[in-house]
Amino acid sequence: MKNTLKRIISLVAVMTVLLTLAACGAKPAAESDGKTFKVGICNYVDDASLNQIVENITNQLKAIGEAQGVTFDIKYDNCNADATVMNQIISNFIVDKVDLMVGVATPVAMAMQAATEDSDIPVVFAAVSDPVGVQLVDSLEAPGANITGTSDYLDTDAILDLIFAADPDADTIGLLYDQGQDSSTTPIKNAKTYLDKKGVKYIERTGSNTEEMMMIADKLVEDKVDAVFTPTDNTVMTAELSIYEKFAKAGIPHYAGADSFALNGAFLGYGVDYANLGVETADMIADILLNGASPATLAVKTFDNGTATVNTEICQQLGLDFDTIQNTFAPLCTKVQSIVTANSFDELN
C-alpha cells in the first residue's frame, strides 16, 4: 500500500513538472494564431507610377502585419486597361470573400464601387485624381459610402508655371492625353483656362493606346509646339518610353504629372510622391481592417504637389543646363530633384 501511494505521488509530481514545462514553452493564442485578412488589389495598367504604389502598399502591409501579429493575404492582379478583365478580377475578389478591395487608378476604383454597392466590402482607392468629380465620394472630408482612399490631385497651374519659367517666350503648347482617362479631364480643362487667360495657343492631340500616342507625338513635332503638357494620364505614361526620344530630338520638353514620366524619358515630372502615396494607402487599409474605421467617415488623403523631377539626360539633349533649370524652378517648388531614364524605379537602386 505504501509503495502504491509512493508511485501515485511520484506520478503526480512528474505530471506537474511536465505541465509546467509545457506552459513555459507555450505562446499566447494571440501570437500563434494571428488573424488573416484577405486584401484584393487590382492595378489598372503596368506603369512605373502605379507599380510603385502597389509595391509600397504591399511592403507597408507586411510591416504592419508583422508589428501587429496579423497577416494580410494579398491577392494581386493587373487588368492592363481591359474593362472585361477588370470586372472579372473584381468578381473573383468577391467570390474569394476578400475583406477589402484596393483599386489602383480611377477606372478600377469606379468599377469596384459599382460592384460592391450592395455589399459590406470596403474599398480603398489609390491615385484617383478627382474622386469628387467622378462621384466616387460625396466629399474629400466625408466620403459617405463604403469607399475612401488617396488622391494624386494635380496642380495644373503649377506645372504650366514651370513651362513659362523655363521658356517665357513659349507661344504654342501641346496638350497630349487620352480623352478616355478620367484623371485627365479636369487637368486639361484647367490647362485650357490657364492658357486662354495667358493668350497662349494650344494644340490638343489625343489617343487611346501606345501606337496612337506614337503617331500623335510625331504630329506634335510637326506642329512645332514649344512644350508638351500631359497630366497623370495612364495611357501616355504607358507610352512614354516609346515617345520620349521623338520630343527630345525635336528639342521639345515634355512636362507631365508624375515623376515616373521623367523616369521613362520625359523632361519633367511634377506631382506627388507615389511611394509615400502607397504607404499612406496601406495605412488606411490597416485602419479599416484592424481598427474598424469606416470608409464613409475616413477622409480621402491628398498630398503636396510640390516636387519637380528633372531628367538630366533629356535636359542635356535639349541643350539645357540642369543647375540653371534647378535654380529657375526652385522658387516654384518645394523640391527639385534629378533622375535618369530607366524602365522602373528598381533599376535605379
Image (spheres, grey):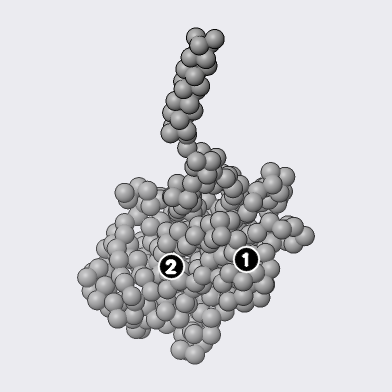
In the rendering, at what x and y percent does residue 223 appear? Answer: 47, 71
**Residue position for label 2:** 272
* Depth order, front residue of 24/44: 24
Task: Decide which of 166, 26 is in the foreground and name it.
Answer: 26
Can residue 307 be seen by looking at this rendering? yes
Q: Residue 144: percent from the left, percent from the top?
A: 67, 72
From this view, report whether residue 82 is shown above or below residue 298.
above
In the displayed structure, would residue 60 be above or below residue 131? above
Count of labels in the image: 2
Residue 199 placement, left or right of 333: right
Q: Name which residue lies at 38% across and 74% down.
A: 306
Q: Distance between the residues labelled 2 and 1?
A: 23 Å
In this rendering, position of residue 271 left or right of residue 84? left
Identify the secondary structure beneath mark 1.
loop
Q: What is the x, y in percent for residue 186?
A: 57, 76
Q: Do the residues labelled 2 and 1 touch (CB within 8 Å)?
A: no
Q: Where is residue 193 in the image (x, y as percent from the top left)?
A: 53, 85
* Kind of residue at disc 2: Val
Residue position marked by numbered label 1 in the rendering: 295
